[in-house]
Amino acid sequence: MTAKGAEALRAELVRLKQVERPRIVKAISEAREQGDLRENAEFQYAKEEQGFIEGRIGEIENKLSAAQVINVKDIAATGRVIFGTTVTVVNLANDSQSRYQIVGDDEADLKVNKLSVYSPIARALIGKEIGDVAVVSTPNGDVELEVSEVEHI
């Protein structure tokens, strides 16, 4: 995972532990004070939410403990597309330009042009250099993308 991705997970972990966990403990306590727990919807909802929060905390802690954090700025720029780089490509069919950062699964978000390293586009681009053409298989046929820029940002 990238350094920014690890930082985002750490921030989420802190929020879950310091804000969400105390909030849900308080909600459970208040629901218990209302009496019969078998028919108390607030209590049931709070317990479900507590389970989700604790599960997410465990998931994040496991990911962070096993993660290999890569700061692409520390890697010498070679012009080759690798994990963490930001790559600008030109679609040879229509000359449209796109810019993507190759990131881990947890960071992937196409809305902000972050592609999972396991996505078809990223897999086609990994190892390519400036001027190389990557062929991406799509349901509508193959798409040719020419690498025009590779940045370590």
Image (tube, rainbow, N blue to C red):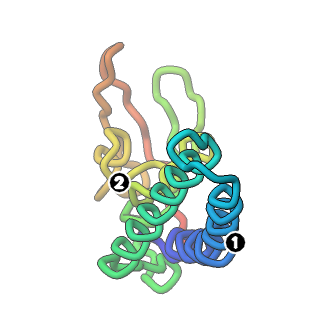
**Residue depicted at x 37% and y 57%:** 129
**Is residue 67 visible to the viewer in this orientation of the structure?**
yes
Q: Nearer the viewer, residue 103 or 66?
A: 66
**Left of 24 or right of it: where is 3?**
left
Query: Which one is in front in this view, the residue at disc 1 or the one at disc 2?
Result: 1
State which quadrant residue 137 falls in: top left
Q: Which residue is mark 1?
A: 19
Placement of 55 over or under 69, stated as above or below: above
Q: CA distance from mark 1 to mark 2?
A: 32 Å
Secondary structure category for the residue under label 2: loop
Q: Secondary structure at mark 1?
A: helix
For the point 59% across and 30% down, which residue is it? 96
Residue depicted at 35% across the width and 13% down the height = 140
Residue 153 visible in the shown view: no
| Spot occupied by residue 27 in the image (x, y as percentages of width and height) | 68, 60
Q: Residue at x 41, y 62 (%)?
A: 55
In the image, what residue type sits under mark 1? Val
- Tell me if 92 is positioned left or right of 138 in this view: right
Residue 88's disc is: none
Instruction: Report x, y in % for residue 59.
Output: 38, 66
Which image quadrant: the C terminus?
bottom right
Residue beneath label 2, please? 117
The image quarter containing residue 60 is bottom left
Q: Residues within 10 Å of mark 1 (few under 14, many from 20)?
A: few
Q: Quadrant of the N terminus?
A: bottom left
The amino acid type of the residue labelled 2 equals Val
The residue at the far bottom in this view is 74
In depth, the one of 53 and 65 nearer the eye is 53
Disc 2 crowd rating (10 Å Cα; few below 14, some 14-19, many 20+) is many
Q: Is residue 15 left or right of residue 61?
A: right
Looking at the picture, how far across and down is residue 111, in whole percent? 62, 40
